[in-house]
Amino acid sequence: MKSKIRFWRRFGGVKILLGLVIQAGLCPFVRAQTDADTTRKEIIVLGISLDTLLKARPPKVDTNYITSYYAHLHLRLIAQGNDYFLQLIGPTDHLTYKPNGASSLGVGVSYSWLSLELTSKVPYVNRNLRTAKGETKQFGTSLSYNGRRVWVNTKYQSYQGLYLNNPDVLEKDWFTVHSQYPQRPDLESRIWYSSLYYCFNHRQFSNPASQMQRERQKKSAGSFLVGATLLFTQIKGDSSLFPHAVRPLFPSNANLTQYRSFSYSINAGYIRTIVFRTNFFTTLLIRPGISLHNASSVSTGENTRSLPVRVGMQGDSRVTVGYNTDRYFAGATYSVVFLSGNLEGASVLRSYKTDIRFVIGMHFPFKPKGLLHRLPGF
């Protein structure tokens, strides 16, 4: 069993993403004892050694389909970026807000239950766009657990400062007169996404082979998935989300300054990895679902109003292409999480969060020594 915890902080312009992959939860009642026959300290949890809990073991899989590198050290270079689309859709037109996001580069290392990634924003990439699109402050963190049968994923992402991506809705041929997009530095968006899924074909299909490439899918295989998702969305601004010029197009929401919703969905989908030329693969995932939206809104000069609970759509998809051998691996992953819900009247709110990630690296057998050998599970 594996899980992965990532913690991301910004310090002096450098973003540090720290992930820990844990095989079992820890109890606060922990004591340490020294084994007389060894130089390492053994940590006991409820009478069970953490070495026993965290030690990587050969997975129970069909070895005709899956090769596991559970006792290998994994080193990788990382390039990643994310984007966000917020659409406010009326009967005749729509607004699309986006952040001026940044890409990042970094390195990662994994062994046993421990995974560490260090990433930093790419300097100067978006500097020329700040004048045209404004500046966005963003923060994100994630936690995931990838077992054989059960997958759990939680992500949080916030954006401060958005720009209107389709300014022609305000003024036809906008850029014949203006050189900048309409900017809203006051707009803030927060997204919290949690999902729980069960994988049926866990002995022949490997999710770690496409996600972290700590395993290799030797033959094509797939699995049906079933699960549930919780999605929290909040958008707020100092003034109406709708500029003056388009408020007549959204009469029921013209003075809307804040929108918040909880979406509870039941999802079912399918994931499949197609292997070709022995070491190349592509993984396709789609998990649509039907959801219930419990939303509230705040308009200028009014208190919070609860909106009727409504049925909507929520789901996600992922595409991965990669290369994996017993020594080297590389891959690119593109994923989308989408939500569709109703505002007041006939207006609709839709949001799309996209992530793209490129990885190249190597893995090889590794036996911890020195201080590493003292860590539980190493």
Image (cartoon, grey):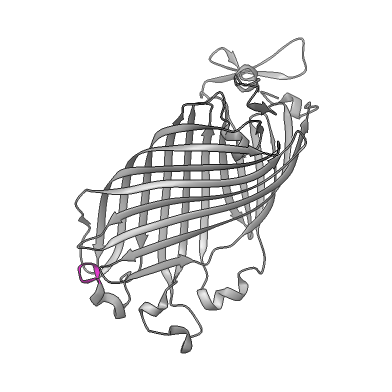
Location of residue 54 (image quadrant): top right
Q: Is residue 167 magenta?
A: no
354 vs 277: above or below: below
- Residue at 70% of width from left, 36% of height from top? 278
Apparent side of residue 335 relative to residue 91 in the rendered image (left or right): right
Residue found at the far front of this picture = 277
Residue found at the far bottom of this picture = 177
The residue closer to the viewer here, 187 or 105, is: 105
The residue closer to the viewer here, 365 or 272, is: 272
- Residue at 59% of width from left, 46% of height from top? 320
**Number of on-image labels:** 0
Apparent side of residue 72 relative to residue 208 in the rendered image (left or right): right
- What is the chief secondary structure element of the magenta stretch? helix
Q: Considering the image in quadrants, where does the C terminus appear?
A: top right
- Residue at 39% of width from left, 44% of height from top? 288
Percent position of residue 95, x then y? 36, 70
Residue found at the far top of this picture = 37
Q: Is residue 253 magenta?
A: yes
Percent position of residue 130, x then y? 56, 74
368 vs 228: above or below: above
Apparent side of residue 196 relative to residue 361 in the rendered image (left or right): left
Q: Considering the image in quadrants, where does the N terminus appear?
A: top right
Percent position of residue 349, x then y? 32, 60
Q: Report the magenta residues as a range.
A: 250-254
Percent position of residue 157, x then y? 47, 53
205 vs 6: above or below: above
The residue closer to the viewer here, 229 or 23, is: 229
